[in-house]
Image (spheres, helix red, strand yellow):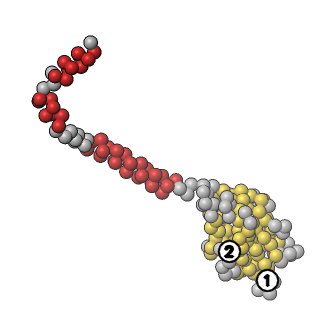
Amino acid sequence: MKNEILARAITEIDDDLLAEAREPVKKKKPNYRIMITKYAAAVAACFVLVFSFMFFGNYGRSGELDISIDGQSIVAGEDDILLPRISVHATEQTPRDMKKMTVPMEIKVDGRTASVTASSGGVIHTESGEEYETLKVKSGTGIEWVVDVSFKSQFELTVTSKKQTLVIKAIYDSERECLILSATEGKN
């Protein structure tokens, strides 16, 4: 019975249907709206990435230090800075105060904070007048490094950020009565 049904189905096929089957299948028109939407989304994602790297790429990342002493930038490996005698803020100076020298500096750090540590014989004064041996500062902070040259002639101030350490060395020249400041890269 199955063979009879198959034979009847084959004989009932029209010539029109066979002619239609011989023609090649027509291709669908591409949907340009979907393609343009996909490409526009890809371009927008690229712009988002580029702008996010531009605006947020350096946030808290590099930690580079920029230290200026009395308006002069001090960089590791460059020329020394000569700083003439600058007295402490006291109006009436005792003989002990005469042996102290003040180094005004501004610390800028690309990031959030930096740690400042003075070696023995030196202290750090904040803008508010507080005195520290170790201090955490924000970018753009002004401090004063006060060194007592009555007992020592060499001092160090270490400034450490997230990725960089700068060691500022001060040597007191008693003949010229000045500090000779230099900077070297420290280990971080």
Question: As rendered, which of 17 and 41 lies closer to the eye?
Answer: 17
Q: Position of residue 163 (x, y in %)?
A: 67, 61
Task: Tell me whether the residue at label 1 lies in contact with that at label 2, contact meaning CB atoms closer than 8 angstroms.
Answer: no
**As shown in the figure, which amino acid type bears the numbered disc 1?**
Asp
- Relative to 117, is 3 above or below? above
**As shown in the figure, which amino acid type bears the numbered disc 2?**
Ala
Question: As rendered, which of 141 and 86 lies closer to the eye?
Answer: 141
Return the residue found at the far top: 1
How far apart are labels 1 and 2 at the CA level? 21 Å
Q: Quadrant of the C terminus?
A: bottom right
Q: Residue at x 16, y 22 (%)?
A: 11
The 10 Å Cα crowd at callout 2, few under 14, some 14 to 19, many 20 or more, is: some
Q: Position of residue 168 (x, y in %)?
A: 73, 71
Res 173 label: 1
Question: As rendered, which of 112 and 36 lies closer to the eye?
Answer: 36
Q: Quadrant of the N terminus?
A: top left
Q: Is disc 1 placed on a helix, strand or loop?
A: strand
Query: Between disc 1 and disc 2, whose residue precedes?
Result: 2
Return the residue found at the far bottom: 175
Res 76 label: 2
Q: Is disc 2 placed on a helix, strand or loop?
A: loop
Return the residue found at the far right: 151
Residue 91 shows in this picture? no
Q: Position of residue 20 (x, y in %)?
A: 15, 33
Res 141 label: none
Residue 25 shows in this picture? yes
Q: Residue at x 68, y 74 (%)?
A: 76
Q: Position of residue 181 (x, y in %)?
A: 72, 77
Q: Residue at x 30, y 45 (%)?
A: 35
Question: As rendered, which of 54 and 17 lies closer to the eye?
Answer: 17
Q: Indicate left or right for 8 with 61 as reference.
A: left
The 10 Å Cα crowd at callout 1, few under 14, some 14 to 19, many 20 or more, is: some
